[in-house]
Amino acid sequence: MSRLAIKICGLSTPDTVGAAVRAGAAHLGFVHFPKSPRHVEAEHIRALAAPVPSHVGRVAVVVDPADETVAALAATGSLTALQLHGKETPERAAALRARFGIPVWKAISVKTGTDIAAAKAYAGAVDLLLFDAKTPDGAALPGGMGLRFDWNLLRGVAVPAPWGLSGGLSIDNVAEAVAITRAPLVDISSGVESGPGIKDVDKIIAFCKAAEPS
């Protein structure tokens, strides 16, 4: 089995970016969504990503972005992927990938097995699917709320693209989550925070150790 990939999302400071890199994260996530407590502007992403080794991915997380928003992010030259976390259709995802030449990830909101089955529509349109917990109707944010879904829904499922698991992961449960789902990638945000949007260096390190105990 190949090494588990870890993504630490919602980073906004040089010290937490450095901690994630040192702890072995394969991807760093930067949220570009003004309603989020983790929001960072495009130029801030450029500065945070500048010292990151080339083998570590830099992912911008956006929600139903306008082309102008993606253009500003792409212009930083810092990104290895664009993560769509809204209601983007397969057609919209494919169009963004084609126009900007950046690999596209799509977060899939999951509550039932039907939601996982619906992800098949994105096969060929995106480079990676990220299964996240569905937030309640009317929630201010589409993710990053520490919610989880029933991981057994993914047990034995043939996912039609590279994929990862997100939503409600923590230092205490990530090993269980990987054992159940066989996820090749895990993505955490609020689970390594000391407060909304405030990443904790010690928690980042502990999570990476818990995810890769060997």
Image: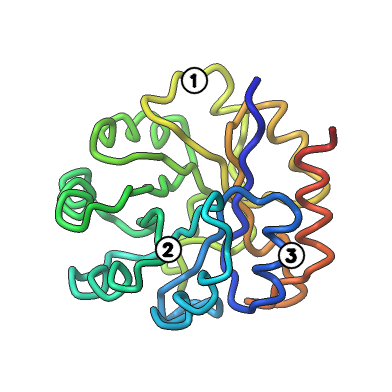
Q: CA distance from mark 2 to mark 3?
A: 20 Å
From this view, report whether residue 66 is shown above or below residue 180: below
Labels 2, 3: front one = 3
Q: Is residue 173 left or right of residue 11?
A: right
Relative vertical location of residue 34 with respect to residue 173 in this rendering, above or below: below
Q: Which residue does the numbered mark 3 point to in the structure image?
A: 19
Amino acid carrying label 3: it is: Ala
Q: Are marks 1 and 3 in contact (CB under 8 Å)?
A: no
Q: Is residue 124 left or right of residue 51?
A: left
Q: Could you say which is closer to the camera, residue 42 or residue 119? A: 42
Residue at numbered disc 2:
61
Local secondary structure at mark 3? helix
Q: Amino acid at mark 2?
A: Val
The Cα atoms of the two marked residues, 1 and 2, are separated by 26 Å
Q: Residue at x 71, y 60 (%)?
A: 191
Looking at the rendered structure, the kind of residue marked 1 is: Val
Q: Nearer the viewer, residue 109 or 63?
A: 63
Q: Which residue is mark 1?
A: 157
